[in-house]
Amino acid sequence: MHRSLRITHILAVGALFTCAASAQWFDLKTPNIPRTADGKPNLTAPAPKLPDGKPDLSGVWDADRSYLVNLAKDLKPDAVQMLPWAAAIYKERAAGLHAHEEPDANCLPQGVPKIDAAPVPWKLIQMPSEVVILYEAFTQFRQIHTDGRKLPVDPNPIWLGYSVGHWEGDTLVVESNGFNGKAWLDQSGHPATEKLKVTEKFHRRDFGHMDLEITIDDPGAYMKPWTVKESPTLAADTELLEFVCSENEQDIKHMVTKK
Amino acid sequence: MFARIIFVSALFAASSSAQWFDIKVAGTPRLPDGRPNLSAPVPRDSKGKPILDGVWQMNGKYLQNLAADMKPEDVPYQPWAKQLFDARQNGALGKTDPAARCIPGMPKLDALPYPFKIIQSPGMTMMLFEGFTTFRQIFTDGRELPKDPNPTWFGYSVGKWEGDDWVVNTIGIKESTWMDNAGRPHSDALHLIERFQRHDFGHMDILLTIDDPKAYTKPWTVKEDLRLIPDTELLEYVCVENEKDYGHLVGK
């Protein structure tokens, strides 16, 4: 699935160069972007600030796809200590025995944090009482409430969870719970349970670069929390495309299954 | 609709969920007893324009029949469109409705039996739909509609103010979408004009004009009424999860 997603997106991007008519929509100059003398976006300019002094995280961001296959790729093996059942299922998934069961291969939501590393961009819109993330992946969204409400206690489990955010200095700290435990954390199949809590720390280092620190805290699958650092980059002067997963889906029947 | 009713009942039994979906939304005008005052005046921004933000639910009849308020003979079909509409009656060809395969499209998306949330941000207004957990972006930064764009399910939308009306123009919609469950067809020439008119805090109309000269001999307009759903939040809705309907639908 994800390989085809990536190819689809590359084809679409390629099409922009041959199709000036579409280009006028997806190749619009994003306003308020600092530019170098030649008109290119200056991605190392300082991060923008809102009137209240908080960083403005808004923009179209290219996900850090390098974490899609293996969220723990930068970590030493002993940093991710799985409970025995989790280690057993992970071994089988990583060997490709369950590829057809991967939820997003079946057009089900990727879950958090896998959706952050999707092979297509997401757009963050920072509003006074919430942050919305529009994901090109499956044209889905998340709402991160920053109005001071607390995470729900024992909520109805869902794919993308319930999220609240608060600021710690210049970092937006997003805490999420209420996951249904069905999503894989990455393509290699790190599992999760309904006990999963995800903390995402968004820090806009400069105009074009985000530090995204993600902590997986799931005592149902792991012996202790573990943390990874992704680096989304700003996609300037473009816009999200529409992505409808269940349209003409042809991959799943080619995927292998454990007999 | 049914799922939502069940869930709403569940809120009364489960106070732990209720704290999330039964939150007091800031800025809501209230009666002395604390209930939202849905007939309070339209909220306005610093420029005096109506604020459309909120969780809204459309009158369900327009999902079933976009022309519910019209005489059947007043829908100005082109002959082929009438023929196709007739062929889709009584559930025939139900399988060919993309929504049955979990693919939503415009203008049906606005009329789903689940609420949507409007959030006006600078340069772009979002519509977040509980149905299908999907979204529309309506650009208000002054850009023009694209010329001959790649057709999509939701189309390409720009919005502007005309007095107190927020007018959204949309083109580039795939011709395979059904405009309602009754099966009203359209062509690739479909141009939708949605005129959002908020009348008071709790009530809004969308005047929807179908301008599609290939499928209809002249533009036609319906007035869809919406109500604000106060003090709540969208639920997650995943269409393809445990989907059992499609196998029972008929059609080619």
Image (spheres, rainbow, N blue to C red):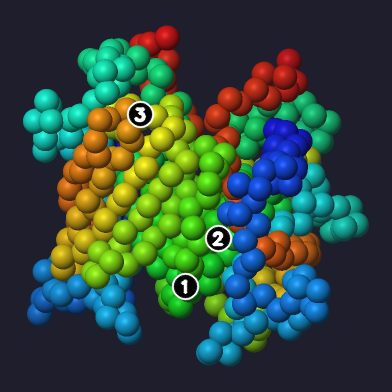
Q: Are marks 2 and 1 in contact (CB under 8 Å)?
A: no
On the picture, is A58 further left or further right than B116? right
Residue position marked by numbered label 1 in the rendering: B122
Residue that lies at the very extreme toward the right in this rendered image = A76
Going from N to C along the chain, the mark reached first, 1 or 3, is: 1
Asked which quadrant contains residue A9, the reply is top right
- Pointer 3 local density, CA inside 10 Å: few below 14, some 14–19, many at least 20: some
Residue position marked by numbered label 2 in the rendering: A133
SS at circle 3:
loop
The answer as to whether the residues below labels 1 and 3 share one chain is: yes
User: Rounded to the nearest whole Å, what is the CA distance between mark 2 and mark 1?
Assistant: 15 Å
Residue A87 on image: x %, y %: 78, 41
- Pointer 1 local density, CA inside 10 Å: few below 14, some 14–19, many at least 20: few
Residue at 43% over, 44% down: B171
Circle nearer the viewer, 2 or 1: 1
In the displayed structure, would residue B197 be above or below residue B109? below
Residue at 42% over, 15% down: B247
- What's the chain of the residue with tag 2? A
On the picture, is B167 further left or further right than B134? left
Residue at 66% over, 48% down: A20
User: Rounded to the nearest whole Å, what is the CA distance between mark 3 and mark 2?
Assistant: 37 Å
User: Rounded to the nearest whole Å, what is the CA distance between mark 1 and mark 3?
Assistant: 35 Å
Q: Nearer the viewer, residue B191 or A55?
A: B191
In the displayed structure, would residue A31 be above or below residue A64? below
